Image: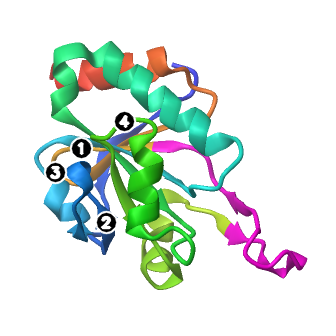
Amino acid sequence: VPGVTPIEPPRTVADFTMPAALPGGEIGELSLSDLEGKHTLVFFGYTRCPDFCPITLAEFIQIKRALGERADQVQFLFISVDGERDTPAAIRAYLDGFDPTFIGMSGVRETLEPIRPDYGLYYELRTNEGRGDNYLVDHSTPSYLIDPQRRLAAIYSYDASAAIIAADIAERLAL
């Protein structure tokens, strides 16, 4: 299916812990292993992103809607690559504008670098352009499906539609 890259066999990804914004406004530490037991759809971005992030999170809403009752078997996780500006409270406020059940994590270089290889993650803070705190961040745009055993099961390209992603996830939930 165009835009869907299944990982066969699924590949275990490293556990990590970051400051997190949980549904209901709770702020705390969260580890990826805390999310085991359900599928987790992951996207790396930042709250001031002008394009890819809001579009992807809007698609997450469509995916959740398309999954219907099965949506409670899937967690939606937004990981900021701009933790200097994106505090858990800022991420919570941002995600609440999309869906208050989405989970957010605040990543900084020390927490992101070790997991970069698992996701082929690319990000670069363009802080050297002389705009102070008003900088852009270049980042990779796929979404990643982590299975209930904390294994990378699929990668969805940015241009994969919500319908295609929802159908792929629904198929996996039916197994």
Q: Nearer the viewer, residue 146 or 52?
A: 52
The kind of residue on which mark 4 rests is Asp
**Image vertical order of residue 133 relative to residue 27, above or below:** below
Magenta stretch in the rendered image: 124-143
Residue type at numbered disc 2 = Ala
C-alpha separation, residue under disc 3 versus residue under disc 4: 25 Å
- Above or below: residue 66 compared with residue 44: above
Q: Which residue is denoted by mark 4 in the rendering?
A: 99
Residue picked out by circle 1: 147
Q: Residue at x 59, y 44 (%)?
A: 53
C-alpha distance separating marks 2 and 3: 21 Å
Three-letter code, disc 1: Asp
Q: Is residue 147 left or right of residue 123?
A: left
Tag 3–tag 1 contact (CB < 8 Å): yes
Which badge, 3 or 4, comes first in the chain's sequence?
A: 4
Mark 4, Cα crowd under 10 Å, few <14 / some 14-19 / many 20+, is some
The label number, if any, that marks residue 149 in the structure image: 3
Residue 40 left/right relative to 3:
left
| Callout 1 touching callout 4 (CB < 8 Å) | no
Q: Is residue 138 magenta?
A: yes
